[in-house]
Amino acid sequence: MASEHLGDRLARLRRLADLTQEGLAERSGISVDVVRKLEQRRKHSARLPTLHALSNGLGVELTSLLGDPPGVPSNGEADPPALVAVRRAIMPPLFAPPSEPGGAERLSLPLLRAELAEGWTLYHGAEFGRLMAVLPGIIADARFAAAVGTTEERAAGQAALGKALQLGGHLAIRLGKSDLALSALERAIDAAGQSADPLLPAMVSNSVAWAYQRQNRLDDAQHLAVYAADGVERDHVHTAEGVRVWGGLLMSAATSYARNDDYDTANTMMRTAERAAGRLAQLPPPADSRLVSVFSKSSVRIERVRLAVQHERPEEALTLARGMRLSKDVPPSWRTWLLLDVARAHTDVGDAAGAVKALEALRRVAPAWMRHHTLAVAIVTDLLATSSQPPGLRKLAEFLGVPQ
């Protein structure tokens, strides 16, 4: 639950791991005083490096402490039917004949690509329930397209199947199902290798690196992103598609460096990515940007703001965010993350009014997303604990279900 206090969640996970507070502190490499204050609700939130250390000490994914909304709870209960259908689409039953698409005829490749693009639009809009409903059909259509037709048509079908399974992997990550995510992405890599799209294996590799990051496998994520980026840089940075894929991989590698406490290297890589994004204006745009890696000057700046906030550099984060004009191709999910990070940065510098203003904007553009997000709850809880409580704060607390 988004309203569950971080300390309660931490204590529950610690007990499940059969650890004392002192044992968790030792395994995490942090002060036992931090663990005690969190569990006693004397400390309402923690920096992401601290949360990463705690999740590593507990042997759980970061989302167990700070989840992304809206997800499927990992509470031991059976998966809901919609998620079971997604699992069956990604991993068809053994020895069962492949199912054909629901329509009487095979979906044309242009229509299949349009179907895929709409699926990615749902994902970036955090419409995960709707996406779960349509994704099995998209994967079935793509799998059928990959199995019939001429050699060229089958290769195009494999490309569609790779993107559909990549989408399934992303959805599974957001739902906290890392086992399903890696299964989907392994199959996506295989399909990408059988396609005629030279950039698709690198795009899926970026998704795998993200899955590794969520499991705190930071070295694996970093090495994979760098390896894939080197291959793209060698052969494909003369096109907008190539620049976007290469830039997305560079950002992914930088994030892993930052989470490994090498902020300087990460910042240097992000500056390089930002300069590369400036080249996109001189290149013909992709046919459908929704099927290519998210990469632009705006997305790089958003990620730089996030890394600065996570590494206790709120002034730097606010400087980076000041005066930003987001490009039209920035997905809604990235815009919402930016507002949340700006609110966190304002809170960290003691600007309660600025934090409330950012949270109010977040509520206007993504109310469902905000209501489920534990970091939004943590920020409002922190603000309520201060002497300065600007107008609008109590309405936000009521909206999020934060006790006052």
Image (cartoon, rainbow, N blue to C red):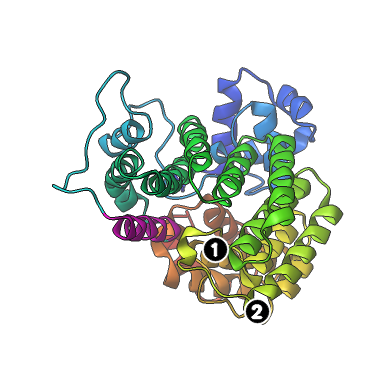
Residue drawn at x 42%, y 29% is 75
Q: Which residues are magenta?
A: 108-124
Vertical position of residue 58 compared to residue 67: above or below = above
**Residue 47 seen in this snapshot:** no
Percent of width and height locating residue 239: 62, 66
Position of 210 compared to 80: left or right?
right
Distance Cα–Cα, label 1 vs label 2: 24 Å
Q: Quadrant of residue 126?
A: bottom left
**Residue 61 seen in this snapshot:** yes
User: What secondary structure is the stretch in magenta mostly built from?
Assistant: helix
Which residue position holds label 1? 334
Position of 103 compared to 130: left or right?
left
Amino acid type, callout 2: Gln
- Tag 2 or tag 1, which sits nearer the N-term? 2
Vertical position of residue 87 compared to residue 279: above or below = above
Residue drawn at x 70%, y 28% is 57
Say if the magenta span includes residue 113: yes
| Residue 300's disc number | none
Amino acid type, callout 1: Trp
Of 23 and 231, nearer the camera is 231
Is label 1 in a helix, a strand or a loop? helix
Of 53 and 38, nearer the camera is 53
Of 334 and 121, nearer the camera is 121
Percent of width and height locating residue 317: 73, 67
Percent of width and height locating residue 30: 79, 35
| Residue 282's disc number | 2
